[in-house]
Amino acid sequence: MNKEKRNKTSLLNKPVQKEPLLKRILTAKSKWDDKDEFLDVIYWARQILGIILGIVWGFIPLRGFIGLALFALTNAGLLYLYIVNYQCVDEDEYGGTFEMAKEGFMTSFAAFLVTWIIIYSGLYYD
Amino acid sequence: MWADTLLIVFISVCTALLSEGLTWLLVYRTEKYQKLKTEIEKQSKKLEKKKEAIESTLLDKNVKKKIEREEERLKNNNKDLTMVKMKSMFAIGFAFTALLSMFNTIFDGKIVAKLPFTPISWVQGLSHRNLSGEDYTDCSFIFLYILCTMSIRQNIQKMLGFAPSRTAAKQGGGMFGTQPKP
């Protein structure tokens, strides 16, 4: 009886094993207990996306205001789809759509501009 | 143009690392800073939880007063933290102004890159600084350097764990204390 009880308690106290971060990022509808962790994922995803878009825009090459506008739309749109449709996270828990949209946006915009300018001037103005 | 642009990115990475290194030496590793930082984070989290709890219940005057007192304490701690940072910020600021003026003279009047867009008029002062001609897609050193620093420095701070936590920034309103709520 006592042994059974002890077993039950040890099972209850056993720390919940967290899945590895990469697996949670790639799996749809993952569970995010730590809000900061999810916001960090969004932040770094934005940085990587900014650099990739900068390289692509530079290679095409896109010029003018359309390049800037397309970046803003793609960056915000893709991340929004990932958050709301893929991970199915309630934005209100994180302070609303705007809070999520601005997470790391300026840094990502700067990274995008730097890569776009460097690739564009390197390829077409050397 | 590859050489110039990549050199500017390299300069920006070096200055960001140097500045973070100096700040670590003068501020981050000090006991006072670490104590204040942990305290602010603890207080911010506590305050956020209390504010969330209060939203779902009716406003009680005593609870409201208590929260206001805690906000005041947090504001004071934030002020202390800024003061701790201030001295080193000034030292680093002076050193980097000298460094920047040196790079400015090296790249003076040189087109370091070509912009794929024409910047709006109030940015042209930066992007076309010290450059001759009317082609506003020419890019000066300072513009590319500022863009590099904007992305690289913040990402380095985040990677090294020196960036302020979100809760603290939200509750403390950043460097200048709490923002008045409408």
Image (spheres, coloured by chain):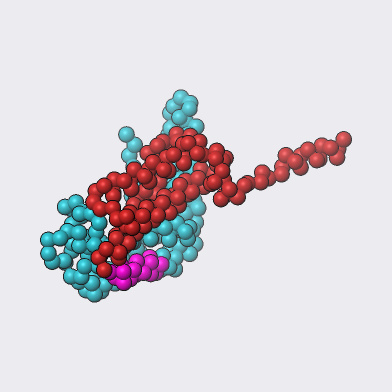
Horizontal side of residue A3 vs A62, given as left or right: right
Location of residue B167 in the rendering, given as x and y in whole percent from the top left corner? 45, 45
Q: Nearer the viewer, residue A83 or B117?
A: B117
Chain B shade in the render: cyan
Q: Is residue B158 above or below residue A32?
A: below
Can you say which quadrant of the picture contains the C terminus of chain A?
bottom left
Can you say which quadrant of the picture contains the N terminus of chain A?
top right
In percent of the image, x 31 and y 46: which residue is there? A70
Location of residue A113 in the rendering, given as x and y in whole percent from the top left corner? 31, 56
Q: Is residue B149 above or below residue A96?
A: below
| Residue A92 visible, this angle | yes
Horizontal side of residue B52 vs A12, given as left or right: left
Q: Is residue A55 above or below residue B107?
A: above
Location of residue A53 in the rendering, given as x and y in whole percent from the top left corner? 37, 52
- Tally of marks: 0
Chain A shade in the render: red
Q: Nearer the viewer, residue B121 or A120?
A: A120
Q: Nearer the viewer, residue B169 or B114?
A: B114
| Magenta residue span | B1-19
In percent of the image, x 58 and y 48: which residue is there? A23
Magenta stretch contains residue B9: yes
Q: Residue furthest right?
A: A1
Location of residue A112 in the rendering, given as x and y in whole percent from the top left corner? 34, 55
In percent of the image, x 20 and y 59: which residue is there? B137
- The quarter holding residue B28 reads bottom left
Magenta residues: mostly which secondary structure? helix
